[in-house]
Every structure is written in structure tokens, then in C-alpha cells.
């Protein structure tokens, strides 16, 4: 038995648990409004080191700001090799973030165990991107740069020494008794003997997110073709069948920018060889070239687990972990040797012949497939660290391969983490709940990642169309038909509507592309939650449920969770309908909002109900909103190709828009080869609205052809 | 970035990951067939230290046995402060145990994170009793004595250096491709710099379990009254209402041995004062005495979280954790001072006036209620260690309180762990799935704990009766009506059948009591899974699903999971029906089995289908089985009270039975004041069966009145 002398204990631990192990966090303002805190000895391997992107130059140009919290209220203690972190919470504060959640947007009160994994139908911290970053409704952000599994208590538990303790009640007799008393702190347990923590100033929550994204280089900038339409074909398709699929799109007039090949392109898969199957693809280089000539890029499915039959097997073996995944060895991608062997193979076999990107599968979970936590890796990094960073590592080093070839990529990945914002990969999974997919799209914007609510199959034409509508208002407009074999026109009764929304996706490409440029250069997520929209916090008075704010002072902050509508770019509010719905409520932030299709006023700071019919996905535009659009082309414009613009203006207020331009395919923008054009719509003295666009800069890219103006609101 | 020189890495880690940190386990045979292995520096606080029971003297009398595994195949490595443990698996081996699981009995292939918690509808290791013990179908057991959260990979993942590697296949083309390739090892990750591990010999799996239970003192021995019927009343009942409830049982002729009071007996609860509410219970001592006179003991609900309004609050405050639970402070029960203050209060206020036991609630989970893992405790034990052992601590120290008063107790608890077998507490929860409850009853027998499939409420008479039937074949026959207010006769249409099965429970008390005595003295779980029954492994040939044993050599061991029937004591096989079922399959092990009610032959090593009607819970008796029964009394016999026995014999073979006797209420049995009587039924030369019972021992307890013999099988 553990024999302890009580008196000694009081003397020792009474002090120890509150002071002795408490450590001072050393804060340093590393950019305007960005502070790095250091305490103890953090692990020498962390998320930012795995991502290895470096910060965006834009960080230096940010406005000065005060530290957004009371530094004394942020405390760290060490105990048994772990760091106990505590941050303050106000009563009127809501929290967002903590990774790619699928069912909840509001995170206050949650307990999360941040752990890279597939999403298992519960927002418990196990997710494809368990990003240890949160943003407060009060306008600041916090990021713990650790590649460990972190326990987060986001205002869920009450300390004995709380400065704002909840009222003690008797459950037997007091009807206001609450199973979850008010807590005034976020607490985290990080299994490391020190941590590196970042605090980001606002003043608005969106500003804190921008700073977080810029810290890892800003958001990604896809090639223009990445924002077009993509189809994934059956896993055993041959090169001929893939060509036929692309031809069918062209003949039927459906847009298509890239096609994804599933495991059958490889000679063996699960585990993988990364080598072409010559029976199905006898001439890979010729095939990719022919597809390119049709305006269609090739994306390749793979996972990183190396088959004993792979040419690189023997070479990579010393740089792999102790355990196998589907009998494939697991490259320790935190080691330069391992990634060189793997991605040299990718580069030689795929990228050099023109492959445009990858779908990197199964780098997230499930536990029963992936390496276990008892696995060891030759780098000496723990299984946990490799698990938390594997998504970053595959993105980083495949991305670098494309960068070396000065050819942009845009692909799919199943895992990411903090630090990965600048990697041009979109997360997906197998959950296939349309509702959850929209909530994930919202949460991606708080987490520095991208998410696609992909379309796979549908039981009905209605579901097919409803899913298709949202995927066209997402980072990647994709049908993933590797199993279903479905095509946009599979349901003839909605094929015209499918074509119309796919064309709309293409028409909006100047808008999408510019919004991604803002993600890259300014850190603003192109798809994001309503809480980041000004005027949203006070908008929903009509919907507030009955609460007793005296008894539950923080109830105010935890009501009004909206998880089925989102912002798409600067001006658009998207409120999708799900199968079975014929109408829905839409929460419009303060300020006037207009119908995207008609330009008519929809409402102002209120909850409206819309019944748009099956053909329409409700989209609303902020007063003064400007949307640049191009003709409905079947493929994205090629480098330098000029396109005519129809620039739409909504509402009655003046508006402005920054239109981005570059070659759309290379990394030359990193050398300054890009341009911003200023679009303005202003009311003239005669009362009419008048649009203008700034002149093109000499020596800079310009793809704008003729411009026509359309004032949508009459 | 983490800069590593590849060549150095190979030299260093190539060795390091396989040899450098590998440690030799020091094995010591501490009892016949029980080995303790030590490696590294285990934590100074563990499960056995928390339980602090000491081993049973029976361990020394066990048969000698060889170490059941190849010692060289059990390996431990250290890395980053954690211990990586590996044990071998054979292809034809199945695993059982790893705590109180609710949906699965077979554990091979599972990944579990052993963590005390409520059961959250998934067998993932989070459960009320996350016992780090498993038993193999090959007849040995393994126990890791750690109070940490342990990651278990029970033959789920494949090492690169596996001696029996699975075949590599191509998923594209090979139909036998398996998402879960064959694994030849159990692996565990224990977050400690060393471990204490125990290996138990068989030769049968049941023997390994016996050894495990005996290591912590053997199973509990409840008072006789604990095996009678119990009702829990509405949380705000007054002492008068409780008396009326007991009277109603008596008047209607329903057995009743103890009544449970819910939170309203306390002046305040959630958090608790542990003091009587004088408005509802003006004279607690008088009330308990009156109830006792009616033959009904009192059980008190509580949780251990101390209200600021409790008399002991200020005194216990220095010995409580950093965080509160429902605004109550959390006693650090690993400290002698904390438990003395808490249980002195219990003893003074409850035990001294005759209270018979407790229902100790909410010592398991949920995370959002309990102290978080960032909590610290004055003992210096981590939150994790306190969480893993809190159930043991409340049991141990409440039990010791009753022991000091030489009065046995039998109660309810929501959490336990390895080491707790000898504590007279039954686990329960809120899940209320009848099917899961039966699977938990099965798994309790592999985990050294007890479980009750309690009855709370029912929508229909059928459900009420079906649930009632199983609770009468469980460690605690209880209606928990604190919320529903239901009574055994609530559904008049099945009230006679309810009474009949409650009476059967009472009639069988000599059997139940003797079976618990075997739990205590021999370590044999009274309720347990079919896999522990000889002849079961080969029984189900007719039900084997189509598998390719050449491709999946271990499929053989993972089929045939039976989780809806169980063994109750030495001779009975119970196969309950669930609501909606009118018939069910029953898997009878090899050997003849007889119907409990009729004595007729039911089958032999086969799958039978029974359609018993609503009134009957199918129960089968092994050939030669002997069941001692007493009259259907309303209360358990008092100390020294003689009861007449009807001794039943089933089948055609000779049989024997060990009948246990003691005073049924005190701890005098620990001083040797108990007796075993040998019952035999043997076939005489004339072909007739003849029963006999050994003579009573002088100076030993004897409660056997007249004996009648009933040979059930004609």
C-alpha cells in the first residue's frame, strides 16, 4: 500500500499542487497580434515542425493589437510528465474550433480528446483534423502547437478555486439544479513536459483565424482547374474506360476538370506498389497526355503503405515503423530518407508524366487498420506523434514534389492538422451524412483546413440534386463514384438542374479563385461559419429559447448554434436543403441580404423561412456584394486564357471587390507574378449604380476579357 | 524542423527500437500457478494497492503448474516513459475479459482503451470496470496491475517482424483480401516506466480466473439477505412511505430483503451532505430499527462528492482534489485522512444505526460530470490513477467500515477494477438494454466483478416479466424504481408469474449462497460465460458460418460468440428471452442437459430451439446436477435459523454438491466459523438414485432442517 503521512502531505502537496509545479509562461510577440508562449521543455517535434511551411509575409503587415487576455489568467503546471494548461473564459463567451467537428459548431462545455482518426459519429475529438486551435466569440484565438493527443476541457469542469464559482444547489428540491455547472476556464492536458502556445489577437474572431492561418503560410491556392468539376471513376476502370467517361461529359456538355482513378491503377494495392497496372493502363504517359489534351487532369488514389511487391520496398524498409497496415510497411515520413524514397517514386512514376494530384487515403484511422500506439518508428518519434502529423507529412512532401515541378496540385486527403492550411488538399470521409457534411464545412473554416461534402451515390433524384447543389458551393465539386459508378446525368429527371448548378460552379470561378487567393494571402477561410459574420451574434432574437439568464449567465453564449448554413467567400450565405425538406429557416445577420438568383431583398437581421423548390439551393448576398462571373465553360481557363466577365452587384449600397489573377497553374505567383484588380460599384449623382474595374498592371497577369455589369437589385 | 542525419539514425534507431530499450521481465512464481513479472519501475500506486485486500489463503493450496506461455515470447520495451508489452497468440486462440464489456464476449481482434467510465454503447474499453485482465481459451490468464489508462491491441495489429505473418494480398483482384489480417500478438501500451504483470496457469480457463480472483482475496461473500429481493423507492419518499412500501410487499406476499433509498434521504444531494433529511426522515435510527423488525434492511444511495453544507466539508477540504463534481469536493480516497473523515461520518450516521449497505453512484463517468484529467489530488496521484481506482477505494473503505462492525453488507457501485473481487458490491448502470445487460453478466465472470441486469421500468407486461426473470438469475434481484415508482405487481396480468419467479429466487437461496461461497473460497464466478464450460468449445458445429480456414486460420477461434446465455453457479445454464421473442436458440455444451422445471432431457452438445411461453425463463441443468432449495420465504433466513431443504437431482449420472453454511450475517466465517456439507446422489445397485448429505460438524454452523430428495429426471 501507498503509505502517506497526512500531515506531511498537507504541507507538501498543499503547496505543491498549486504553486510548486506552476510555471511562468514566457510570452513573445512574434508578429503584430501574434504571441508565442513557451513554458518548460516542449517536445522537439510538433505540428508546425511537421508542416514546415514557415509563416506568411503578410503577418508582418498586420495591425498592432493588445494581448487579448489577462496573461496572469493563463497558467501552466507540470505533473508526472504532463503539462496542465488553463485559460480563462468569460460568461458571455462562446468557443469555436478544436478541429473538424461534424455535429457541433459551439464547443463551449465540450470535452475532447484530440486524436487523428476517422469521424466516428460523435464529436469527441477523434477526427480527420484534430486541430488544437480555438477561436473565441470575444475575438481572439489560441493554438497549442503539440503533436500529442491533447485532452481538452472547453469550459466543462469546475475548479475548487474558481474565481467565478457556480451556485451550489440541492438536486432534491431545486428545479434550477444543473448537471453542468458554469465553468470559467478552458483546461488542457498535454502529455509533454512543456508546451509552445500561440495567442492571436482579433479584434474580430475572423482576424484571429486569419492570423492562425497566416502563421502556417496562409491558406492554399489551388490551380484554377482544381475549382472546376471532378469525377472519380470505378476502381477497376481501364485507361480506355476513363477516356470514355471524359468523352461522355464533353458530349453531354457537363463540365469536367479532373478525373480521379481509384486503387485499380496500381499493380497491387492495400498494400500499394505505386506502380501502374499495365493490364489496365498499358501506356500511362500517353494516357495522361491524351486526357490533358481533352482538358482533363488525372488524380490518383493511393495510401502510403508499401507493398512487399513495390519496387521501393527494400529500399524504404529501414525507414518504416514496427507495424504494418494491411501488410504494407509504414514509411516514417518524419525522416527525410523515407519521404525521399516514397515521393521520388511518385514523382518519377506520376508527376513527371503529368499527373495532377492525389487522393491520399487512410492516413487518419481507424485504429484497427492503422499502426497501433505501441508501434515504434525509426525516427524515434512516438506512434502518437506520427499519427497526429501523418496527414501533414503526406501533404507537405507531395506538395513539395509538385512545387519542384512548378505545377500546382489540388487533391484529397483524409487527415490534416494545424500547420496544414497552405497545403492544397481537401479532406473527405466515408460518413456520408449530408447534414454532418455541412457542419464539417462550417467547422473547416475554424480549423485551417478544407472539406468537401462529396457526392457518392443517392437513392433518389432529390437526394442527388440536393447533395450536388452543396458540393458546388464547397472547396471541391466532386462526384466520388468509385463504387457507385454514378454520373451527373444518372437521374434523367434532374439532369438539367444538375447541369445548371455545375455550370453555375464554373461561372463563379473568378469569385471562387479570388476567394482562395484571399485565403492564401490574407488567411480568410473561403468557407466558414456564421459566427464569423458581423451582425450574426445579435440576429436571432426571435429564436432564443426560454432561459433564465440570472441562473445561467452563460446560457446566452451557448444558444443559437447554427450548423446548417454557412458563408462562401466574402459575400455569399449558403443555406442548403436536405432530402425531404421543402422549406427551411435561414438566419440572416444584421444588414440587408438579397436573393442570389433574383437580387430581391430577402431580409435584415431576422429568421426567414424559404421554400425554394427542388431546383434551387438558397444563396443570399450581402448588401453591396459583388460577384464576378465568367461564361459556363466546360473546363477552367488555361494559363493566360482571357475570359469575359459579368460582374454582378446586389443591394443598394456601394460595393467593392478584389479580383485576383495569375497564371492559374504554376508557382510563379510566389515570385510576385500575380495581380489584384479593384472592382467598385458606386452610386452616381443621378442615383444610378456604376461599376468600375482598376486597370491592369503592366507586366502582371491579366485574364479579364470584356466586362459587363449587372445590377441585380432593381 | 527536426533535423536528423539518416545514416546515424539507422545505426542508432535500427538497434534502439528493437533491442536497446527492450527489458527482461523478472518472473517469480508467487503461488502455485501464479507468476508475478516485474520490469522497470512500476508506479508506486496500482490496482492491487488501491484494493489492498491481500490474497486468499486458498492460493497456497493450488496444484502446481507449468508457466503456460513461452517466457521469451512475452516482451517489454520502454519508450518515452511508457511500457510496450507484447504477449503471444496462437492461431486457434480466443480471448475473453478486458473488463465489463456489454456487447461482445470474444475480445480477440479488439482495440480497447481501458478507462473507467460509464458504458457509452460501444465496447471500446470505457466501462465501469476496465479490468486489465484477460483469459485465453487455451487456459491461462494475464493481468497487468496498473492504475493507468491502458491501450490494448488484443491481436488486432500486425508487426513487421511477426513470426507468423499473414499472407499479402491484392485488394484489386483477390476476393480473400481481409481488412484485418491475422495477428499473432496481444500488445499493450501502459503509460508507466515499468509494470507488474501476473500470469495465471489453468489448465482450464476457469482455473486461471479462479487464480486471478483468489489473488485479491477471492470473491465476495454477501450476507444471505443480500441474495433476496430488493426494491428501490422514489427519491423523495418519506420514512412513512418506505414503511408502506415494505408493508405492501408483505401483504401481497412478495419477497423483500432490503429497500434502497434514493437521494432524498439526504438533507442535500448533488453535492451530498451524507446527513439525513429530517423533514422526510425525522427519526432515522427508529426508522431503520422498525424496518429491520419487518425483515427489511436499508440501503442508502450516495455519491462521494461533498457539499459545502455537509458537516464534514471543512475538515475534508484539504484532502480533496482540485476540481468539483456538481459543486461538491472530491475526497482523495487514496489518502487515509480523507477516507477516515468520510467513512467515519458514514459509520456514525448510518452504519451504527443499522443501515445495511450503500448504492455508491457516479464514481465511473461521465467525463462531463466527473473530475477532469487535468485535476490534481493532494496525494500526488494523478487524476487518471484516482479515476481508475475510485470504485475500488469506495468499495474497500466502506466495506472495511462494515467489517469493523462485524456486520456484512451487500450493495451497489458504478465502478470497480481488478482487485475488487472480494468487495460485496454489484455494478449497475443506466444503459437499460436487456440484451446488453445479459452480455455484461457474462463478461462480469471474466472480470472479477458482479453485475445486475436491474429492472427499472417497462412499457409492457411482457418486458416487465422478461426482465424480472433474468434479474432473479443474477447477483442482485432488484427493481430500481426510484424514478418509475413501479412495483412487482404493477402489471396485474403478470403479477402471479412475477411472484412465482421471485419465490423461485428465494427457494434457490441455498444454491446461490453456496455458489457465492465458492466464489469466495475458490474464486469461481457465480455467473459466467459459456466458454468456461467444458464441452462448449466443440458444441456448435451446426452453427458454424462458412469460412475458409485455410485462408483465415484464426477464424475458427473467433466464430461462435454466444452472448445471450450464461452459466449460473455450478450446474445451471440460463437462456433468457427478450421482449418480442417467442422462441430462441440455446447452445448446449457436450454432455446431457435437462430442463430445470421438468427434469426432461433437453439435448447434448447441440443447438436447440425452445419456445417456453411467457412464464418461463429457460434454464437447463447439467447431467448429475444437484440444486438445493428451501421454501419460498419472504425474507432470507436469519442467523442460525434452520430451513428445510428440497434437494433436486437432474439427469441420470451420479452427482455431488458442496453446500455452504455460516451465520449469514457476520464476518465470523473469517475466523473459521463456517461449514461445508457434502451432498451426493448415487445410483444404487437396484438402479435407483439415492441422495445423502454429510453430517454436520460439531461446533460449526448448521441451518439445514429436514431434507427431502427430488429426482427430477424420470
Image: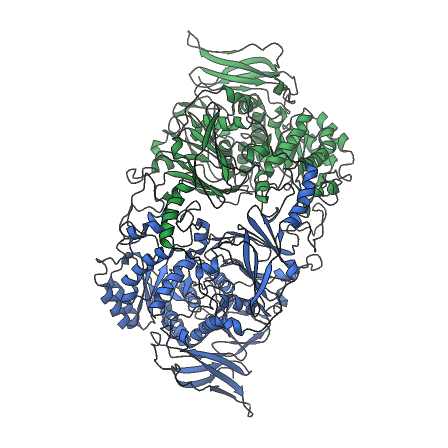
Chain colours: A blue, B green
Q: Residue at x 74, y 28 (%)?
A: B290
**Viewer-proximal residue, A675 or A1?**
A1
Q: Dividing the image into 4 quarters, which one contains the C terminus of chain B?
A: top left
Residue A70 percent coordinates (x, y): 65, 62
Q: Dividing the image into 4 quarters, which one contains the N terminus of chain B?
A: bottom left
Q: Residue at x 58, y 11 (%)?
A: B696
Residue B306, image quadrant: top right
Going by the image, does B219 lie left or right of B26?
right
Residue A296, image quadrant: bottom left
List the single residue furthest toward the top. Answer: B685
- Whether residue B600 is situated above or below residue A319 in the rendered picture: above
- Whether residue A108 is situated above or below residue B580 in the rendered picture: below
Residue A683 percent coordinates (x, y): 54, 88
* Residue B559 visible in rendering: no
Going by the image, does A356 lie left or right of A438?
left
**Viewer-proximal residue, A38 or A570?**
A38
Residue B663 percent coordinates (x, y): 64, 19
**Viewer-proximal residue, A424 or B226?**
A424
Total numbered labels placed on residues in the image: 0
Residue A604 percent coordinates (x, y): 59, 74
- Whether residue A431 is situated above or below residue B454 in the rendered picture: below
* Residue B211 visible in rendering: yes
Amino acid at each position: 500500500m501507498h503509505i502517506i503521512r497526512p500531515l506531511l502531505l498537507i504541507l507538501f502537496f498543499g503547496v505543491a499542487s498549486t504553486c510548486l509545479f506552476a510555471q511562468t509562461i514566457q510570452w513573445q510577440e512574434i508578429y503584430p497580434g501574434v504571441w508565442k508562449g513557451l513554458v518548460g521543455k516542449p517536445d522537439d517535434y510538433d505540428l508546425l515542425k511537421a508542416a514546415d511551411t514557415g509563416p506568411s509575409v503578410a503577418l508582418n503587415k498586420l495591425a498592432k493589437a493588445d494581448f487579448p487576455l489577462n496573461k496572469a489568467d493563463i497558467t501552466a503546471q507540470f505533473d508526472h510528465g504532463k503539462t496542465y494548461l488553463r485559460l480563462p473564459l468569460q460568461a458571455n463567451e462562446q468557443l469555436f474550433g478544436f478541429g473538424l467537428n461534424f455535429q457541433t459548431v459551439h464547443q463551449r462545455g465540450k470535452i475532447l480528446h484530440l486524436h487523428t482518426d476517422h469521424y466516428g459519429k460523435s464529436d469527441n475529438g477523434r477526427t480527420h483534423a484534430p486541430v488544437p486551435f480555438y477561436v473565441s466569440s470575444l475575438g481572439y484565438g489560441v493554438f497549442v502547437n503539440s503533436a500529442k493527443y491533447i485532452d481538452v476541457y472547453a469550459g466543462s469542469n469546475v475548479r475548487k478555486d474558481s474565481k467565478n464559482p457556480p451556485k451550489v444547489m440541492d438536486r432534491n428540491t431545486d428545479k434550477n439544479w444543473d448537471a453542468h455547472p458554469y465553468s470559467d476556464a478552458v483546461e488542457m492536458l498535454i502529455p509533454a513536459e512543456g508546451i509552445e502556445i500561440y495567442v492571436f489577437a482579433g479584434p474580430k474572431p475572423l482576424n484571429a483565424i486569419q492570423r492562425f492561418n497566416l502563421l502556417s503560410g496562409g491558406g492554399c491556392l489551388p490551380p484554377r482547374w482544381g475549382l472546376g468539376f471532378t469525377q472519380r471513376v470505378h476502381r477497376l476502370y481501364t485507361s480506355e474506360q476513363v477516356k470514355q467517361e471524359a468523352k461522355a461529359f464533353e458530349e453531354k456538355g457537363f463540365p469536367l476538370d479532373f478525373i480521379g482513378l481509384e486503387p485499380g491503377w496500381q499493380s497491387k494495392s492495400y498494400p500499394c506498389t505505386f506502380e501502374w497496372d499495365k493490364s489496365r493502363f498499358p501506356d500511362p504517359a500517353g494516357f495522361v497526355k491524351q486526357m490533358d489534351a481533352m482538358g482533363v487532369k488525372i488524380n490518383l488514389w493511393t495510401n502510403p503503405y508499401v507493398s512487399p511487391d513495390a519496387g521501393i520496398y527494400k529500399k524504404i524498409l529501414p525507414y518504416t515503423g514496427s507495424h504494418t497496415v494491411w501488410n504494407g510497411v509504414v514509411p516514417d515520413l518524419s525522416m527525410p530518407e523515407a519521404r525521399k524514397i516514397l515521393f521520388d517514386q511518385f514523382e518519377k512514376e506520376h508527376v513527371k508524366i503529368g499527373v495532377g494530384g492525389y487522393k491520399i487515403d487512410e492516413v487518419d484511422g481507424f485504429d484497427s487498420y492503422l499502426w497501433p500506439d505501441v508501434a515504434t518508428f525509426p525516427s524515434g518519434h512516438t506512434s502518437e506523434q506520427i499519427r497526429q502529423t501523418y496527414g501533414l507529412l503526406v501533404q507537405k512532401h507531395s506538395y513539395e514534389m509538385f512545387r519542384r515541378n512548378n505545377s500546382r496540385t489540388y487533391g484529397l486527403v483524409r487527415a490534416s492538422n494545424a500547420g496544414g492550411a497552405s497545403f492544397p488538399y481537401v479532406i473527405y470521409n466515408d460518413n456520408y451524412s449530408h447534414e454532418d457534411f455541412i457542419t464539417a464545412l462550417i467547422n473547416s473554416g475554424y480549423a485551417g483546413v478544407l472539406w468537401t461534402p462529396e457526392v457518392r451515390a443517392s437513392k433518389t433524384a432529390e437526394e442527388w440534386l440536393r447533395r450536388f447543389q452543396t458540393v458546388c458551393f464547397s472547396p471541391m465539386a466532386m462526384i466520388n463514384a468509385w463504387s457507385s459508378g454514378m454520373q451527373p446525368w444518372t437521374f434523367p429527371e434532374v439532369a438539367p438542374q444538375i447541369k445548371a448548378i455545375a455550370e453555375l460552379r464554373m461561372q463563379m470561378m473568378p469569385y471562387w479563385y479570388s476567394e482562395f487567393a484571399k485565403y492564401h494571402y490574407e488567411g480568410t477561410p473561403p468557407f466558414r461559419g456564421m459566427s464569423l459574420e458581423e451582425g450574426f451574434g445579435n440576429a436571432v432574437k426571435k429564436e432564443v429559447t426560454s432561459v433564465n439568464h440570472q441562473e445561467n449567465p452563460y446560457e446566452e453564449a451557448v444558444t443559437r448554434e447554427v450548423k446548417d448554413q454557412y458563408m462562401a467567400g466574402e459575400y455569399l450565405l449558403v443555406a442548403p436543403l436536405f432530402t425531404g425538406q421543402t422549406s427551411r429557416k435561414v438566419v440572416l445577420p444584421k444588414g440587408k441580404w438579397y436573393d442570389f438568383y433574383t437580387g430581391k431583398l430577402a431580409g435584415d437581421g431576422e429568421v426567414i423561412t424559404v421554400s425554394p423548390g427542388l431546383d434551387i439551393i438558397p444563396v443570399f448576398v450581402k448588401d453591396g456584394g459583388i460577384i464576378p462571373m465568367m461564361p459556363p465553360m466546360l473546363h477552367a481557363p488555361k494559363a493566360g486564357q482571357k475570359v469575359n466577365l459579368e460582374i454582378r452587384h446586389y443591394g443598394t449600397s456601394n460595393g467593392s471587390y478584389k479580383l485576383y489573377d495569375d497564371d492559374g497553374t504554376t508557382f510563379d505567383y510566389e515570385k510576385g507574378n500575380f495581380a489584384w484588380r479593384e472592382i467598385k460599384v458606386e452610386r452616381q449623382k443621378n442615383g444610378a449604380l456604376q461599376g468600375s474595374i482598376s486597370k491592369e498592371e503592366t507586366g502582371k497577369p491579366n485574364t479579364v476579357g470584356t466586362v459587363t455589369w449587372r445590377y441585380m437589385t432593381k
